[in-house]
Amino acid sequence: MTIKGAARAYLQEQLEEADLALTLKIRGGKTPLWAAAHTDYATALAACAAEEAEPEAFDYYARAVSAYEQALQVYTSAGHSREWLATTLALSRLLRHFGTREGGDMGFLRLLRATKQIETALADRHEPPARAALLVELAHTHRACADNARKSKRGDYLKQAIACYEQAGQIFKLREQAENWSNCLVGQAMAWRTMGEEHFAHAARLLQGATSFYDRASQPMDWSYIHFEYGRTLLQHANRLDGEERLQTAQDAVTALRIAQQTALTLENVEFRLRLHNELGIALGFLAQYKTGKDSILLLEEAIRLLERTIRQCDPQSQPLELACTHGNLGKSLLALAAENTGSQERKMRARAIKALQTSLTPALKSGWRQEWFGNLVELGNALHFTANHETSHKRFALLRRAAKIYLKALQHLPRGKAPEMRMRLYSWQGLALACCGENDKTEAGDRQLKQAEISFRLALAVYQGHETGDCADYARLQSNIGNLYYTMARRADDDTAALTLRHARHAMEEAIAALNEESPELATAHWNYGLTLKHGLLRDLSEDAAADYQTAELAFRTALASPVLEEDPADYMSVKHALATLLLMQAQELPQNNMAGITEAIALFAHIKAMAREHGHMEFAGQIDGDMEQAQQMMDEQRPRCLFSTLRRWFRS
């Protein structure tokens, strides 16, 4: 028999004994002994309810409530104040557990009933210990109400809970009951943490103070739990900070969770260990983001080992939520580790990450922890998209199509009017994936994908402008994507359509460049794309002012080449130089002035590109440059007689 099965059998045995004792006491009438038998019976029912699943648990809860209520009637009429108070507390606690599990309107009504019952009891005079016990239970109930209340009322319930914890804590402090006082500190901290991210630091300080009241040897479960909550709170707080403070707080969170883990390994509470391992895995992954090289890799490898061990320990039948959540966290850690690797090792890591994220998207996670499910869904889309961007085979476009479908699914599950920044990014990512697929597909299906991409980008732009969400970089990136899409569409359109589409592309790219600051790493790419768009219009004779557009395109390419960001990528750097060189040759053919200067510079650029291509192993590109240099040299040879004739004519005129 399993531990859980043995525990359930023991509880059932206790329930049968309490039921038998109650049957015997009924013969004596409604006496205090009869009431005591009812409280024992109710306690046994409550214990069974805690172990059972719905709907059996709700039946146990309802029978326990009835038994406590009957006992209360006797204690009230008999004047047994101590027993009445203990039963009132037990009934209120039971209603809190019942209401929390039941949820919905009926569950909330049970919580309100528990609140009213304790407040009625507090209206009477009690000894300080009894009053403190009532205040603690009232605080717990207010916290439960906050979890189930409307957002507008949540803060009020949490404030009431904090006030009750503080009052109870003062009583325990005066009576030097350190353990009870520390429990009140923990309760306050949990309530403050729920109040919002601006209270994380205060919650962490309260939990740090509470850790000194627990002893690892005599209170291993409490010791582990308080460090677990302390680490969780520090991790949430670290997410709000910047720089060195963020790094130090994340390090403290990992330390606290490791302390909790050391003790938790000796405990029989499997569910707590799983939660702890999950949280520690998340913390290690978070800390790894702010480390470099080997330090980052070691942290991520530790997180992955921890999460994989947790998956092996999870029972799919009894712990479906924990298992799904752990798979999701494993996928995120594998993605982070893949970014630290290259080549085949990176591809293997990404494949494992995608599989883990797919496994995490279970119906149980979707219904139980919807926000976690949604986050994993978006993470899966990004993983597929990123993998596709680094894939050179035919698999690339299959991955992009899958990513686009994932983004669409995420958009369908995002409540209307909620999270505008996420909605904007999902539309933008969907547009990018569709645009890449459409650009590769020259059929009508590809054209449809490009139009779908345009719709996605326009929807993203509408969300940005309607909610003023995101930052300038988001807006610039979006306009740049729109410009690139129109450039792609123009290249496969007839002249009339292309002229209009190129004007749209030019406008979008100008918007993108204006929105980026001088230090932005994306500015060089924006100038490069802007130059290509102008160059395409000149190439097809669609420019309204060729001289001005040649000058603007040349400036765009030169600005991109001046960026230190572009110099770090030899392939892109050579591509921009090649675009500039070919533009100069086009200009020399189309415009009569300064022909020789443009051709001479183009030849020099081609020579430099060829040397770079050979240096970095791009031999095919180097071979292409040979043909470009021959064309440039031929143009140079054709221009020399014209230049000589022009010089002689000027000499004779003078």
Image (cartoon, helix red, strand yellow):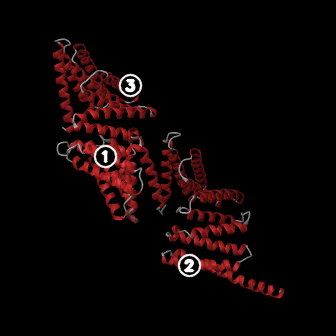
Location of residue 339 (image quadrant): bottom left
First in sequence, mark 2 or 1: give its number: 1
CA gap between label 2 and label 3 equals 78 Å
Q: Amino acid at mark 1?
A: Tyr
Residue drawn at (53%, 61%) of the image:
520
Other residues around mark 2 within 10 Å, as few (<14) / some (14–19) / many (≥20): some
- Image spot of residue 631 (x, y percent): 65, 78
Quarter of the image where the N terminus is located = top left
Residue 322, image x and y in percent?
32, 43
Marks 2 & 1, CB-CB < 8 Å contact: no
Which circle's residue, 2 or 3, is located before the other in the chain?
3
Which amino acid lies under the numbered mark 3 shown in the image of this protein?
Leu
Of labels 2 and 3, the one closer to you: 3
Q: Please determine whether, in this image, residue 168 is positioned above or below residue 629.
A: above
Of tags 2 and 1, which is closer to the observer?
1
**Do we see residue 434 in this rendering?**
no
Q: Label 1's element?
A: helix
In the picture shown, does residue 446 fall above or below 198? Answer: below
Around disc 3, counting alpha carbons within 10 Å, would you say few (fewer than 14), some (14 to 19), or many (20 or more)? some
Q: Which residue is mark 1?
A: 230
**Image quarter for residue 541?**
bottom right
| Residue lying farthest to the right in this orientation | 653
Question: Nearer the N terminus, badge 3 or badge 1?
Answer: 3
**Of residues 154 and 481, the one drawn nearer to the viewer in this rendering:** 154
Q: Mark 2 sits on what residue?
A: 608
